[in-house]
């Protein structure tokens, strides 16, 4: 049976609002939480970017839902040894309900310490080594590691969960999906792409979960909802590799001038069939879990709508 969860947008909301939305999501019948991990929002209009590990700590005290980062980059902005400690603590606080979603990152978030932004193949090699470092540390052993990208010197994590957090890997191209199938506990995407799910299974992911996130904009007026989606998330209409390569929100704003409101794929407005049809694309592509993010300020209206008109019909 497919799981339907809520996708908390750290780019659009501050920490207290994210915690409030998580509580609303649980009451509305959502079965899990995603939360994005950013240093910058995609564009200034989104306006937020709280430290995800602080928010996860708060979430652990107010909801009983599973929580997953979607996704953390454990390579440049924060060393994998530190992410390993953060994830272990999150898993303890959440009583085993935490999953670490990871990816190769975006320059938007990872350039801030002045490091050169590597090419995609090198970023994937860094991610693979980072995952190994984290798994070594989750054994509780004293770890010394001298790798191609990371060094760890006699480090040991003392606060450990009964079971280490599962690691889910994000992938949008063949090489990243192959890495996910080969080493991950699950696959993460934001596109209803059946070919990528199939490639994940063929690369070793058969029997492992495939999970996806998507954005919607509920509102009583479809035209106004589409305007809201365009105002806050025009970057969702930017294709190709730009999302990995551009370093500043203003660059996304400049490129988003080429995007039209009509080109955004997020379902908008008050018709439940429009939302259900968009979600079913992910189900048809083979995803086991779908996480839905509401664009804009009307969280209460969205949760009422999904609780009464969308989730019951999907189930």
Image (tube, rainbow, N blue to C red):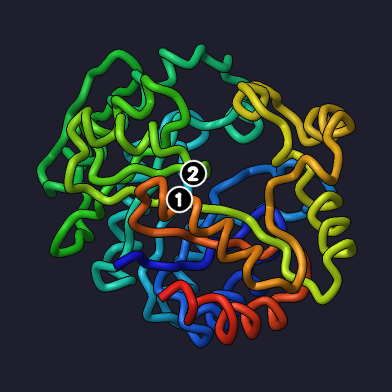
Q: Nearer the viewer, residue 44 or 255?
A: 255
Q: Is residue 60 left or right of residue 278?
A: left
Q: Which mark is residue 293?
A: none
Crowding at mark 1 (Cα within 10 Å: few <14, some 14-19, many 20+):
many
Find residue 253 and report its horizontal and vertical position in percent.
84, 35
In this figure, which residue is indicated by the disc labeled 1?
212
Q: Nearer the viewer, residue 256 or 194?
A: 194
Residue contact at pointers 1 and 2, CB within 8 angstroms: yes
Q: Is residue 255 left or right of residue 294?
A: right
Circle nearer the N terminus (1, 2):
2
Q: Is residue 311 left or right of residue 243?
A: left
Distance Cα–Cα, label 1 vs label 2: 8 Å
Q: SS at mark 1?
A: strand
In the figure, 16 relative to 189: above or below? below
The structure residue drawn at horizontal position 83% and vertical position 57%, both measured from the top left corner, is: 226
Find residue 116 and report its horizontal and vertical position in percent.
58, 14
In this figure, which residue is indicated by the disc labeled 2?
192
The structure residue drawn at horizontal position 66% and vertical position 63%, both measured from the top left corner, is: 274
Tag in front: 1 or 2: 2
One can see residue 49 in this view: yes
Q: Nearer the viewer, residue 102 or 171?
A: 171
């Amino acid at each position: 049976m497919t799981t339907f969860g809520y996708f908390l947008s750290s780019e659009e909301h501050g920490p207290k609002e994210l915690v409030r939305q998580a509580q609303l999501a649980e009451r509305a019948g959502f079965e899990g939480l995603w939360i994005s991990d950013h240093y910058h929002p995609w564009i200034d209009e989104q306006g937020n970017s709280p430290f995800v590990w602080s928010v996860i700590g708060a979430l652990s005290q107010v909801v009983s839902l599973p929580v997953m980062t979607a996704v953390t980059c454990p390579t440049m902005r924060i060393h994998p040894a530190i992410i390993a400690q953060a994830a272990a603590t999150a898993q303890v606080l959440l009583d085993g309900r935490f999953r670490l979603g990871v990816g190769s990152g975006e320059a938007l978030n990872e350039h801030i310490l002045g490091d050169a932004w590597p090419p995609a193949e090198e970023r994937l090699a860094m991610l693979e080594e980072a995952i190994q470092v984290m798994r070594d540390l989750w054994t509780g052993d004293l770890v010394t590691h001298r790798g191609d990208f990371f060094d760890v010197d006699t480090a040991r994590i003392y606060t450990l969960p009964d079971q280490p957090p599962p690691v889910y890997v994000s992938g949008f191209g063949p090489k990243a999906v192959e890495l996910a199938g080969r080493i991950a506990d699950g696959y993460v995407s934001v596109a209803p792409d059946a070919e990528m799910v199939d490639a994940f299974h063929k690369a070793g992911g058969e029997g492992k979960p495939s999970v996806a996130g998507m954005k919607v904009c509920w509102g009583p007026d479809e035209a106004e909802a589409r305007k809201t989606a365009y105002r806050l998330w025009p970057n969702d209409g930017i294709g190709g590799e730009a999302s990995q390569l551009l370093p500043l929100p203003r660059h996304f704003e400049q490129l988003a001038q080429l995007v039209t409101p009509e080109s955004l794929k997020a379902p908008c407005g008050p018709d439940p069939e429009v939302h259900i049809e968009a979600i079913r694309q992910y189900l048809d592509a083979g995803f086991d879990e779908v996480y839905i993010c509401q664009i804009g300020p009307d969280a209460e209206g969205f949760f009422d709508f999904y609780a009464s008109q969308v989730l019951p019909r999907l189930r």
